[in-house]
Image (cartoon, rainbow, N blue to C red):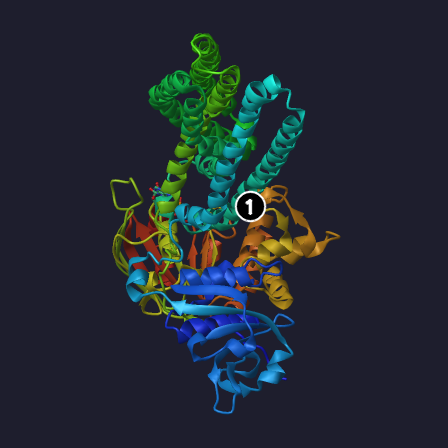
């Protein structure tokens, strides 16, 4: 048996992944490993079929998954990905003259081989993914048609469900006429003639219509639910992916506000998948009811014909007010959420400082505003609701009033009057919910607006964007006259920074606080882009490298350590794609994680709470360091990696790190002289500029001057 496809740092590619990379390369829409890894959502971190389709679409391919017989495959369908049993896959390329199939099988290496149709039939699941290229222009402009608008394309995908809802509503409304007509016929024909047989036949007919109506309503609810589920599936992931891929500079507003915006996805989804929509669908049928009243009761139709526009106009009149109130209540919700998130995440600090009062005041202000806007919104809604109720009842009373005159004049029958009263009630019924529906329309619109702004924010992975795929890297870092300013900052944080670090070189970046040291690291990781100049890895501008590939090759420990809830193992392994146990243990040893895990019964499976609470600062740093090391990256970027460790632990970590990273390019941002043991060269940054760059010995030659200048603490 041959070995499975591998990538440079050892993680194995599944057959599906290898096949997808092969197809994408064949169709000239290459997919980078990083893109592939970023899409994996299977339980064991593997690529699912759904992920495969999503990745293809992002890369500018149209991909369709479905059932297809092996005999149907001809040259037009190549290349196609055939799903085999046991989670295997191959790529179909065509047929030979003898009827054999030409296939790429990742288990057999890079070439294309032949296989007989009968042999393949035994393991083919019957399902395949077919691919087609989007036009190059679509890809270049980033609007590949398959991806479409995050919201409207999902709605469009539901068009059949909504057509069904519309048809069901039309039928239900037609059937709704039956009871009124039934009563009219009973009054006018059955009662005077005592026609019991007709009565039985009519009752059976109406009974049938009511039963049908009941089933239709059930079906309608089912269609709407299905549309909701589909919308969830199509939009939910896109919204979350956008959060993951949003450019740091586009991340505006607080964490709470962003979370609140995303939560509003629920409001939007619910609007399009709830009874509210049904109420809107019923609106056009009012005209039908008024027309039937005209047929039945003649001039009586004037009453609903006037009542309906009256209620509708009231709705239109309160619309701007409701819209303004919905916007306000939306932003109130955001501020409330911001205060809440900030308070909960900073609880320890808030308790130990006098910030509690400040946060409570902000919270109370937000609540007060929300409640006062809520009251106003409810008052307006209630007013409209009462007015509609009043109009409905007044219309029915008026119909009876005029109806009596018409009957006396012989222009209408008793049955026509009763039917008109019932039909008027039915015609005005959808208007009863108009005020609430309008409120919800406005809420949904506010939610859509802010979610759309989030979805339109600049992404690191815009659809259709392709990168040059690079597997490994040598580790040469170059900054060429880099200028950079944070968003909304008037001054450049980095003003013309240039340096070059050779593969395997170890460099410390020193400088006073706020001088721009960490910013250099953020630019290297591609978290922010230089305003002018370029940041390069192995001679390639990092803007040409897939951000995932870039960060996979640069192991980093940032100044603010962030651990997520889960086990120590999960936290460390998140630093690599499918990390192997031996890499985990190696990284844990070097970073000093094993030292403190040795005393725990669960070892690497020890649970960590959110943000690593429950661990000491030094322990958190050790886990973060192990996370940076586990993928055995060619570049290490460490921003104060040991600042919370005691002297002995730090010394041990430094010794082990020195041995483990002999070939690694290392950039350490620090104030601590102890870490200088790891480096050969220092770069000094002051006010966003490089003020010195040279061998480490430069520090001891100018020790006193440097200390004062660089803020380097004595060890
Ligand atoms: N996200 C941000 N938005 C706006 N300004 C920022 C942001 N992060 C940092 N800055 C500003 O950029 C400047 C440089 O910050 P940086 O974090 O690079 O400093 P540093 O040299 O690493 O400092 P320290 O030694 O304190 O870590 C600071 O003046 C800071 O106020």
Work out whether residue 240 or residue 654 is closer to the camera in this orientation and state it. Answer: 240
Work out whether residue 293 or residue 481 is closer to the camera in this orientation and state it. Answer: 293
Residue position marked by numbered label 1 in the rendering: 226
The percent position of residue 289, horizontal first and vertical second, equals 45, 26
The local secondary structure at tag 1 comes to helix
Work out whether residue 438 or residue 135 is closer to the camera in this orientation and state it. Answer: 438
Residue sitting farthest toward the bottom = 98
Location of residue 258 by image quarter: top left
The percent position of residue 144, horizontal first and vertical second, equals 35, 58
Q: Is residue 571 left or right of residue 329?
A: right
For the N terminus, the quadrant is: bottom right
Work out whether residue 600 or residue 113 is closer to the camera in this orientation and state it. Answer: 113
Counting every numbered tag in the picture gives 1
User: Is the CB of mark 1 within 8 Å of ligand 1?
Assistant: no
Residue sitting farthest toward the front = 193
The image quadrant where one finds ligand 1 is top left
Q: Is residue 289 visible?
A: yes
- Would you place residue 606 above or below residue 188 in this image? below
Q: Is residue 35 visible?
A: no
The percent position of residue 472, horizontal first and vertical second, equals 44, 71
Instruction: Please name the residue shown 59% across and 45% down the image.
Output: 612
- Would you place residue 711 above or below residue 129 in this image? above
Q: Residues within 10 Å of mark 1 (few under 14, many from 20)?
A: some
Instruction: Please name the residue shown 64% across and 42% down the image.
Output: 614
């Amino acid at each position: 048996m041959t070995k499975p496809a591998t990538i440079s740092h050892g993680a194995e590619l599944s057959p599906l992944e290898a096949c997808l990379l092969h197809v994408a390369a064949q169709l000239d829409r290459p997919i980078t490993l990083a893109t592939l890894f970023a899409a994996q959502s299977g339980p064991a971190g593997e690529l699912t079929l759904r992920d495969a389709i999503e990745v293809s679409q992002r890369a500018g391919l149209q991909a369709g998954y479905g059932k297809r017989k092996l005999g149907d495959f001809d040259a037009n369908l190549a290349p196609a990905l055939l799903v085999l049993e046991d989670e295997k896959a191959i790529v179909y390329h065509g047929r030979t003259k003898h009827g054999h199939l030409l296939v790429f099988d990742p288990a057999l290496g890079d070439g294309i081989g032949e296989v007989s149709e009968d042999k393949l039939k035994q393991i083919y699941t019957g399902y395949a993914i077919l691919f087609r290229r989007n036009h190059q222009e679509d890809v270049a402009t980033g609007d590949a048609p398959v991806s479409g608008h995050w919201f409207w394309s999902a709605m469009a995908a539901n068009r059949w469900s909504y057509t069904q809802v519309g048809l069901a509503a039309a039928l239900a409304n037609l059937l709704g006429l039956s009871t009124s007509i039934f009563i009219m016929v009973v009054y006018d024909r059955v009662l005077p003639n005592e026609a019991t047989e007709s009565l039985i036949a009519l009752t059976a007919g109406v009974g049938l219509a009511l039963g049908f109506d009941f089933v239709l309503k059930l079906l309608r609810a089912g269609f709407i639910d299905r549309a909701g589920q589909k919308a969830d599936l199509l939009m939910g992931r896109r919204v979350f992916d956008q959060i993951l891929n949003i450019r740091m500079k586009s991340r505006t507003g607080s964490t709470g506000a962003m979370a609140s915006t995303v939560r509003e996805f629920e409001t939007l989804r619910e609007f399009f998948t709830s009874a509210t929509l049904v109420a809107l669908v019923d609106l056009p049928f009012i005209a039908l009811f008024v027309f039937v009243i005209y047929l039945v009761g003649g001039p009586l139709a004037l009453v609903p014909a006037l009542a309906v526009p009256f209620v509708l106009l009231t709705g239109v009149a309160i619309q701007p007010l409701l819209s303004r109130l919905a916007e306000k209540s939306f932003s109130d919700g955001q501020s409330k959420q911001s205060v809440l998130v900030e308070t909960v995440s900073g609880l320890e600090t808030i308790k130990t400082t006098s910030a509690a009062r400040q946060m409570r005041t902000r919270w109370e202000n937000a609540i007060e505003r929300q409640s006062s806007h809520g009251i106003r919104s409810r008052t307006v809604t209630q007013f409209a609701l009462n007015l509609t109720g009043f109009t409905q009842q007044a219309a029915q009373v008026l119909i009876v009033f005029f109806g009596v005159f018409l009957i006396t004049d012989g222009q209408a029958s008793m049955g026509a009057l009763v039917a008109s009263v019932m039909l008027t009630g039915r015609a005005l019924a959808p208007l009863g919910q108009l005020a609430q529906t309008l409120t919800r329309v406005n809420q949904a619109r506010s939610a859509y607006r802010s979610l759309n702004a989030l979805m339109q924010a600049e992404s690191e992975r815009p659809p259709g964007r392709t990168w040059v795929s690079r597997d490994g890297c040598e580790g040469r870092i170059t900054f060429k006259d880099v200028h950079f300013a944070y968003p909304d900052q008037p001054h450049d944080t980095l003003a013309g920074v240039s340096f070059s670090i050779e593969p395997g070189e170890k460099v410390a970046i020193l400088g006073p606080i706020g001088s721009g040291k960490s910013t250099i690291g953020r630019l290297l990781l591609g978290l922010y882009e230089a305003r002018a100049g370029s940041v390069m890895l192995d001679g390639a501008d990092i803007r040409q490298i897939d951000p995932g590939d870039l960060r996979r090759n640069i192991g980093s420990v940032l100044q603010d350590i962030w651990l997520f809830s889960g086990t120590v193992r999960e936290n460390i392994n998140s630093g690599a794609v499918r990390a192997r146990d031996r890499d985990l243990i190696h990284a844990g040893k070097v970073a000093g994680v094993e030292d403190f895990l040795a005393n725990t019964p669960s070892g690497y499976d020890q649970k960590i709470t959110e943000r690593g609470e429950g661990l000491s600062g030094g322990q958190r740093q050790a886990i973060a360091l192990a996370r940076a090391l586990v993928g055995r990256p060619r570049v290490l970027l460490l921003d104060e990696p040991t600042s919370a460790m005691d002297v002995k632990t730090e010394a041990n970590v430094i010794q082990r790190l020195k041995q483990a990273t002999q070939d690694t390019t290392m950039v350490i941002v620090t104030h601590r002289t102890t870490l200088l043991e790891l480096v050969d060269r220092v770069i000094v940054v002051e006010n966003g500029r490089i003020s010195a760059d040279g061998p480490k010995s430069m520090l001891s030659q100018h020790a006193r001057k440097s200390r004062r200048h660089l803020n380097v603490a004595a060890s």
